[in-house]
Amino acid sequence: MIAYKNDRSLKMIEVKDIRKGFGDKIVIQDVSAIMQTGKCNLIIGTSGSGKTVLMKCLVGLFEPDSGEIYYDGQPLSEMNDEQRKELRQQIGMLFQGSALFDSMTVEQNIMFPLDMFTKKNYAEKLKRVNEVLDRVNLKDANQKFPAEISGGMKKRVGIARAIVLNPKYLFCDEPNSGLDPQTSLLIDKLIKEITIEYNITTVVNTHDMNSVMETGDNIIYMYQGLKEWEGSNKEIIFSKNQRLNDFIFASDFLKDAKDMRMLEMKGKIDNNRNMDEQLK
Amino acid sequence: MMKLFTEFGRYLLMLKGMFSRPENGKMYWKEFMHQCSEIGIGSLGIVVIISVFMGAVSTLQTAYQLVSPFIPLSTIAQIVRDTVILEFSPTLVCIVLAGVVGSKIASELGNMRVSEQIDALEIMGINTKTYLILPKLLASIVVIPMLVVISAVLGIWGGRLAGTLTGILSGATFDKGLHQFFKPYNVFFALAKAYTFAFIISSISAYHGYYVKGGALEIGRASTKSVVVSCVLVLFADYLLAALLL
């Protein structure tokens, strides 16, 4: 048994100098970070920057070549199969393509972890399924198959399945891929609300800037396998890191918007100064 | 050559990885029964059709070749019986099942791998080799020998039907031939082959499906490869068992 601490404030993930390569190619190089509890921890970066590999290392799907990952202070590499199994039952994950089981209905998909890991009777399980479906604002979809619902609904079902066992950790791999901006925003808000409501450690892997600005309490920017920058959504816009700026403000439109925002901010600061001087 | 050893090693590790304590016995039993139904009921139609025609053609071709008046007609039934039990039902049916069941297992697992469903199960803390492969393997080992027995019965019946319909030999003569020099050991041999082939078909196709990398194209390739490899290994095992047990 893993000696998990009851203090929920300690429920966090720590990454120390992890490195991962495939053959000769090193994908992640000496990345260290702390994923905080009750916050949305975002891993951002261009395609091929190592975000997904980092996330797969975090959840134990890949073994890092060196370095260590700690869950509540417990090193992942020192856990045996049973301990890992136990830890994984406390992890919920939303996959890029939702990864719903094709042959099962929405209800069966969400009920699956309950069937596998709890001894509840059918009525209790159904109650819990309806609770989480209600939480993700998805009603009357119980008997539908994944092929019969939209991309946004699939993501919500994926979230519902991820939280049905009350996980301590929630991982979301590209939760907005393939969704329109409005639906993306709804999914982002949902992830944020669930993180605060359940006080869980959420790690989101994204390259959607709306998500970054909406949910990024703690942001890690990856560039060619290295951690290039770390900060919050309030700091990212003022960052002087050129690579990060190139990533965020990729289009001329966004660059202009940033300049206007900076001018606006500068104007406000100048106004405040003038007012202060007048008051003096 | 090195790649072959690597693949074989990974195959053995996959088999070893299947044996772990189930997270929930009830769910595993449900999956096992589901697979029995999928493999058994799903393949029954094709097995019935192949078996009846296989027996019928055997009767006609044996009669065509046995032209000597010194050989009694009941010998035709005897030859059909032994050919169907010893070779046609176990080998031919299993070659067909390698296509039907093998490609289904490989493409199902391949699709689950590509669409991250296997990763989703792993994240939940489920041993995917035990949950996804073991029930398929056990279901094949239970159901395929049953299909082979059904096939043998239907093959002999098809032979009898063809013999009487074409007037080559009467039903009574065929029945007499069926009882002549019958060796129960042949049934044991057929079942030994069926169990071996069932293991080969299910494990090889599961291996190719489980380790798929890429997209839809690779799923198709894995499916085809699993059928080809299974067929070759079935034929190889067929020869080996015949050499060892007969």
Image (tube, coloured by chain):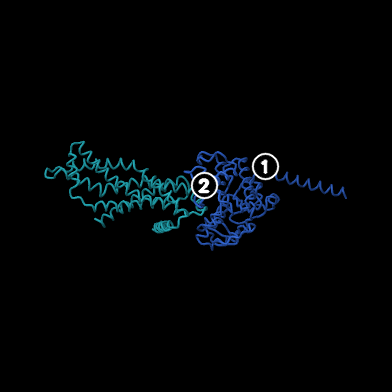
Chain colours: A blue, B cyan
Q: Position of residue B53 (x, y in %)?
A: 27, 40
Rendered position, B2 above or below A263: below
The three-letter code of the residue at mark 2 reads Met
Side of A53 relative to B213 (left or right): right
Q: Position of residue B140 (x, y in %)?
A: 37, 50
- Say which of B122 and A260 sits in front: B122
Residue B67, located in which quarter of the rendered image? top left
Q: Position of residue B168 (x, y in %)?
A: 18, 38
* Nearer the camera: disc 1 or disc 2: 2
Side of A245 relative to B56 (left or right): right
Q: Secondary structure at mark 2?
A: helix
Quarter of the image with the N terminus of chain A in it: bottom right
Q: For mark 1, does the 10 Å Cα neighbourhood hold few (<14), some (14 to 19), or many (20 or more) residues?
A: few
State how far apart marks 1 and 2 are (Cα).
45 Å
Q: Which mark is residue A111?
A: 2
Residue behind mark 1: A253
Side of A95 relative to A193 (left or right): left
Chain of the residue on which disc 1 is drawn: A
Q: Residue furthest bottom?
A: A78
Of the two numbered discs 1 and 2 on the same chain, state the one appearing first in sequence: 2
- Say which of B128 and A64 sits in front: B128
Say if labels 1 and 2 share a chain: yes
Q: Secondary structure at mark 1?
A: helix
- Say which of B165 and B226 sits in front: B165
Side of A279 relative to A117 (left or right): right
Q: For mark 2, does the 10 Å Cα neighbourhood hold few (<14), some (14 to 19), or many (20 or more) residues?
A: many
Chain of the residue on which disc 2 is drawn: A
The three-letter code of the residue at mark 1 reads Phe
